[in-house]
Image (spheres, rainbow, N blue to C red):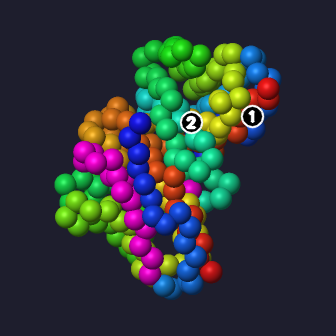
Amino acid sequence: GPKVLQIPSHQIIDMGQMVTLNCDPVSNHLYFYWYKQILGQQMEFLVNFYNGKVMEKSKLFKDQFSVERPDGSYFTLKIQPTALEDSAVYFCASSLGGGRYAEQFFGPGTRLTVL
Amino acid sequence: QQQVRQSPQSLTVWEGETAILNCSYENSAFDYFPWYQQFPGEGPALLIAIRSVSDKKEDGRFTIFFNKREKKLSLHITDSQPGDSATYFCAALSNSGGSNYKLTFGKGTLLTVTP
């Protein structure tokens, strides 16, 4: 089936540094999402993005977070500066449509460790 | 506060048996419940989903049973195969708050099917 790729699979950085997580969504998809999963916890919605704009974000999407997809390239999640509590696995997803029942296709995740 | 709860945390069945994975929720506004299957190293993939107007949804060996009054649902996997060994996530979507996208996930059930 359609594949979402995430780069890198693991990232270790020092607290206070900037990190960019990259997502290569399914090629014809128009809606993009980030989810965060802290170890042992459930996956939680962060943000969704369409037509160059954030459509909806959760309270987990702090001011230090930003998303963009410049010129149809990678869909990125940038955290600047990072904090210890940002350590988690971040899942990217994409969907063709934005309706309630649009299937979201997930990538394998990027494990971020903030030291 | 965990809005979607799954049990058991892990489950082992013999090949050919029926595996039963449970999910419960608190938010009465949840009306769409997709189940995702995740293999190690991959992202979650949509397996089967049910809308709250139905009490049963079947797709091959996978069946969702839904009890709206008790706010419970279960995923039954009949004739379990070793290839079904994966983590299964129950998710929910609310019909209030205007969100089409914000899936709420449970923590998952790790299923192991022993040959």
Q: Is residue A19 magenta?
A: yes
Q: Nearer the viewer, residue B67 or A12?
A: A12
**Image location (x, y in percent) of residue B96:** 36, 38
The part of the chain drawn in magenta is: A18-37
Residue sitting nearer the eye, A12 or B22: A12
Q: Quickly name the residue at label 2.
A: B37
Residue B111 in the figure: left or right of residue A88? right
The residue to which callout 1 is attached is B112
Residues beneath discs 1 and 2 located on the same chain:
yes
Asked if B60 appears above or below A47 in the picture, the reply is above
Q: Quadrant of residue A68?
A: bottom left
User: Which residue is pictured at 33% across the width and 35% down the height?
Assistant: A102
Quarter of the image holding residue B11? top right
| Amino acid, disc 1 | Thr
- Subunit under mark 1: B
Q: Subunit of mark 2? A: B
